[in-house]
Image (tube, grey):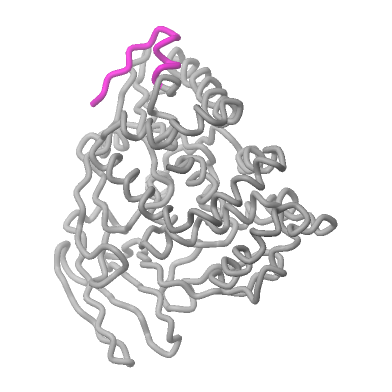
C-alpha cells in the first residue's frame, strides 16, 4: 500500500497547478488541463458538473471530438430527468439531484466508474466551547460527483457555522497557485534526468505522453515533487474523480454563496512548501513510487473513499498514515503531527473565545484519524470531542 494520504494531498495541489476543475466546462474545450512550463492543453474524459443557476443544472462530459456539443441540460423541478443528444449522435442522459442544495450532484449516464447516486455517511465530530461549537469534518480532496455525502449532520453543521476553516482558503483559485508552483517547482539549471534513476526515464517518457506531452523532455525543467503531484492526478481523473467535487472545494463554494467567513489554517505557499521542501532524495523516491505504482492508485483511492463513505475512521488511519508513520517518521511528523498540533492550538483559542461563534472545520481526512489526530490534540487540551 502506498502513502495514500500524502500522495492525495500532492494530487490536489497538482490538480490546482494544472488547472483541473478551474472553469465551468459548458463545452468540451473547457474541460482541459492547462499546463505550466509549456504544457499543451490536454483534453480529458473527466465528468464535470456546474452549479445550478436559476433552477437549471448543467452537466458536461468532456468529449474527445470537439465538434460534438457535449452539453446535457436538466431543467424543471428537482428530481426531473431530461436527455439531450448532441450533433454527433451521442446521447447524454442526466439525472438531477433530488436535493436542490446539492447543486453539483448530477450524474451523466455512462460517466467513468459511476452512473448512480452513492449515499455516504462520513464521520463528523463536535467540540462544545465556552460559547460556541467547533465541528470537525474530514475531506477527500478529489471526489466523484455522484457521491451524496451531505448528511443531515453535515448540513446542520454547515448551517450553524458562521465561519468555515479549511487547509487553504483560496484552494479554488488556480491562478494563485501557478506563480508559486513556478517558483518552487521549476529548476531549469538542473534537469530532471540528472536527479532520477536512468531506469525511470522510459517510465517518465510514457507518463509524459499520457499527459499529452511529446515526451520526457518537456518534464526536464520540473522538480521531482511537481512531476509526481502532476502525475498523481491522472489515474484519479481517468477513474472519474474530480478535484472540483472535492469536499473542501464544495464547502468553499457553499460558504462563499452564503457569505460565510472563510479562513485557512495555511497559505497556498505554505502548503506547497510542504512538498517542495522535502529532501530531493525523498522527492525522487516518491516520483519513482508514482511511476511504478500508478496502476495501483485507483484501487488505493477507491479503498480510501469507501472507508470515508462508511465513516470507518480506523481504516482511514491505517490507509492514510500507517506506512508513512512506519517508514518515514520524520515526514509523518512534519506533514501530519506538527500541523495537527498547530491547528489544535488555533481551535483551542476559538473554543475559549466568547465571540467566535460556531465554526466548521474541513481538513483532509487523514488529520482526523489515528492517535495523532486533530481530535486527540484537542483532547490533550482538555476538550471533549463527540462524534455526531
x then y, percent, for residue 24: 44, 67
Residue lying farthest front? 199
- Write down the region rendered in magenta: 375-388
Compared across the picture, whether 56 is left or right of 68 comes to left
- Which residue is pictured at 40% across the width and 75% down the height? 62
Compared across the picture, whether 166 is left or right of 224 comes to left
Q: Is residue 296 above or below residue 162?
A: below
Residue lying farthest right? 189
Compared across the picture, whether 141 is left or right of 41 comes to left
In the picture, the quarter occupied by the N terminus is top left
In the picture, the quarter occupied by the C terminus is top left
Compared across the picture, whether 37 is left or right of 265 comes to right
x then y, percent, for residue 385: 32, 17
Q: Is residue 112 above or below residue 184?
A: below
x then y, percent, for residue 305: 32, 46
Residue 264 visible from this viewpoint: yes
Of residues 225 and 327, the one drawn nearer to the viewer in this rendering: 327
Residue lying farthest top? 382
- The verdict on residue 2 being magenta is no
Residue 354 visible from this viewpoint: no
- Which residue is pictured at 61% across the width and 43% down the height? 268
- Which residue is pictured at 69% across the width and 64% down the height? 219
Report the number of numbered marks.
Answer: 0
Task: Give the image quarter of residue 381.
Answer: top left
Task: Give the image quarter of residue 367.
Answer: top left
Of residues 282 and 13, the one drawn nearer to the viewer in this rendering: 282
Of residues 152 and 207, the one drawn nearer to the viewer in this rendering: 207
x then y, percent, for residue 299: 35, 52
- Which residue is pictured at 26% across the width and 23% down the height? 387
- The verdict on residue 377 being magenta is yes
Amino acid at each position: 500500500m502506498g502513502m495514500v494520504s500524502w500522495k492525495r494531498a500532492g494530487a490536489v495541489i497538482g490538480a490546482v497547478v494544472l488547472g483541473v476543475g478551474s472553469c465551468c466546462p459548458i463545452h468540451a474545450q473547457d474541460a482541459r488541463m492547462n499546463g505550466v512550463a509549456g504544457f499543451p492543453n490536454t483534453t480529458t474524459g473527466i465528468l464535470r458538473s456546474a452549479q445550478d443557476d436559476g433552477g437549471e443544472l448543467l452537466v458536461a462530459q468532456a468529449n474527445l471530438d470537439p465538434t460534438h456539443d457535449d452539453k446535457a441540460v436538466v431543467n424543471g423541478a428537482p428530481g426531473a430527468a431530461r436527455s439531450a443528444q448532441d450533433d454527433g449522435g451521442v446521447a447524454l442522459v442526466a439525472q438531477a439531484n433530488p436535493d436542490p442544495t446539492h447543486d453539483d450532484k448530477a450524474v451523466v449516464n455512462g460517466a467513468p466508474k459511476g452512473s448512480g447516486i452513492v449515499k455516504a455517511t462520513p464521520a463528523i465530530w463536535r467540540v462544545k466551547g465556552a460559547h460556541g461549537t467547533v465541528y470537525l469534518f474530514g475531506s477527500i480532496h478529489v471526489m466523484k460527483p455522484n457521491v451524496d455525502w451531505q448528511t443531515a449532520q453535515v448540513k446542520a453543521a454547515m448551517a450553524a457555522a458562521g465561519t468555515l476553516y479549511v487547509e487553504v482558503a483560496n484552494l479554488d483559485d488556480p491562478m494563485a497557485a501557478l506563480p508559486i508552483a513556478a517558483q518552487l517547482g521549476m529548476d531549469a539549471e538542473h534537469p530532471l534526468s540528472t536527479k532520477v534513476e536512468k531506469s525511470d526515464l522510459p517510465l517518465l517518457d510514457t507518463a509524459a505522453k499520457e499527459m499529452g506531452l511529446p515526451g520526457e523532455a518537456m518534464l526536464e525543467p520540473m522538480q521531482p515533487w511537481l512531476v509526481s503531484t502532476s502525475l498523481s492526478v491522472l489515474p484519479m481523473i481517468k477513474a472519474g474523480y474530480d478535484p472540483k467535487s472535492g469536499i473542501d472545494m464544495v464547502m468553499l463554494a457553499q460558504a462563499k454563496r452564503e457569505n460565510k467567513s472563510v479562513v485557512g489554517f495555511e497559505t497556498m505557499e505554505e502548503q506547497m512548501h510542504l512538498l517542495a521542501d522535502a529532501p530531493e532524495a525523498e522527492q525522487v523516491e516518491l516520483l519513482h513510487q508514482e511511476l511504478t505504482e500508478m496502476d495501483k492508485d485507483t484501487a488505493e483511492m477507491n479503498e480510501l473513499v469507501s472507508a470515508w463513505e462508511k465513516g470507518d475512521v480506523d481504516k482511514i488511519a491505517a490507509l492514510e498514515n500507517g506506512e508513512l508513520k512506519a517508514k518515514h517518521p520524520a515526514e509523518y511528523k512534519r506533514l501530519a503531527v506538527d500541523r495537527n498540533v498547530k491547528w489544535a492550538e488555533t481551535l483551542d483559542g476559538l473554543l475559549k473565545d466568547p465571540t467566535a461563534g460556531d465554526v466548521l472545520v474541513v481538513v483532509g481526512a487523514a488529520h482526523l484519524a489515528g492517535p495523532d489526530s486533530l481530535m486527540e490534540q484537542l483532547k490533550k487540551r482538555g476538550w471533549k470531542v463527540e462524534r455526531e
